[in-house]
Image (cartoon, rainbow, N blue to C red):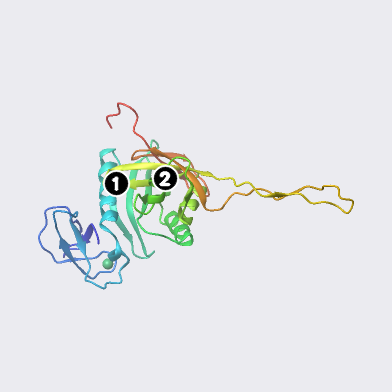
Amino acid sequence: MLLIAANTAGARTLATRDLQNGPYTCPQCSTDVVLKRGRKVTAHFAHTPGSACQAAGESTRHLLAKQVLAEEFTRLGYQAHIEVVHHAAGRRVDVVAARTDEHGRQRRVAVEIQDSAIQVDTAKKRVVLDRRLGYDATVWLFTTYRAAALFHAKPDAEVRVPNEMLWADHRYGHGVHLIDPDGRAVWRAELSEVYREGESREWYDEDGDPTGVDYPGYVPKTIRTVQLHQAGFRLTSAPGLFGDAWSIVFAAEPEGSTS
Ligand SMILES: [Zn+2]
C-alpha cells in the first residue's frame, strides 16, 4: 500500500486528496496501482495481488503512521515529504522532514517507520545509504504494534527486546522511539540492563581449606526493563554519533508552545 502514486503526467499524487480514479502507477516499481477509499482505512493506492514490490507489503498502520508524522511535522513548521523514492539507490524513505537551519542550510532527516521486524544489517545499510543521499540523519520509529512488548511493559518487568531496537538504543543513545499512529503520539522507551546474580560455590583445597570460587553474575544480552516517557514530534539535534551530522531525538513540545 502506498500514500503517494504517480499520475499520468508523472506527478506525485497523495491518495488522501480528492482524486479522480486514475490511472496511477507506483513510483517505486512503475506498475499500475489502484486508488482505494474506505471508511475504516485511510485512502491509499494498492498494488495488484501478488505484487513483489517492497511497497506492496506495508500495513495500514504503517500508512497511518506516515500520514500522522507528515501532518505533525507540517504543523511544527517542517517541510514533510512522504515516501520519497531514490531510484538509483533503491531506497524509499518513509517520511522526510526538512528545515532550513539558522545558517540558511537545508537540513533533511530521513524517518524510518518499522511496523515489522528488520535485520540489523539492513538497518545499518540504510543509515549509510542515507548519508550518501545527503540526509543529515536517519531516525527510527517503531510502531507500538511492532514494539508492543516495550509499549505494554509494566515498570520493572523484564522484556525481551528485538535486536534492531537494541541496536537503535546503542547506536543513538536515546532509547527507542515508538509511534502510536491511532493515538497520534510518540513515546520514548528507556531501556535498562538487568543484572543476574551468579551462583556461588565453595571449593576446598587439598588441606580442606575453603578457596571460595564464585561464579560471577552476568547481564543478559536481550533482556531489559523499560521506562516509557511520552515524547512529541519536535525533532531536536544532539551532536552526531558515528558520522551523523545529527543525532535526532523526538522531543515534547514546550509548555504553552504555539508552534
Ligand atoms: Zn510498487
Callout 1: SS:
helix
Instruction: List the residue tagged with mark 1.
Output: 69
Estimate the x, y position of residue 220 in percent, counting from the top left.
57, 52
Using the image, determine if residue 156 lies above or below residue 165: above
For marks 2 and 1 on the same chain, the one whose residue lies earlier in the sequence: 1
Marks 2 and 1, Cα distance to the nearest angstrom?
A: 24 Å
Instruction: List the residue tagged with mark 2.
Output: 153
Q: Nearer the viewer, residue 233 or 187?
A: 187
Q: How crowded is mark 1: few (under 14 residues within 10 Å), some or many (20 or more)?
A: many
Q: Quadrant of the C terminus?
A: top left
Q: Quadrant of the N terminus?
A: bottom left
Residue occupying the point 50% across, 53% down: 167
Estimate the x, y position of residue 77 in percent, counting from the top left.
28, 38
Q: Residue furthest right?
A: 207
Which amino acid type is marked by label 2? Ala
Quadrant hosting residue 98: top left
Q: Which of 82 and 183 is in front in this view?
A: 183
Residue occupying the point 24% across, 60% down: 2
Which amino acid type is marked by label 1? Leu
Callout 2: SS:
loop
Using the image, determine if residue 236 lies above or below residue 55: above
Q: Residue furthest top?
A: 256
Q: Which quarter of the rendered image does ligand 1 occupy?
A: bottom left
Q: Nearer the viewer, residue 165 or 4?
A: 165
Estimate the x, y position of residue 111 in percent, counting from the top left.
36, 50
Residue occupying the point 26% across, 64% down: 27
Estimate the x, y position of residue 78 in percent, counting from the top left.
30, 42
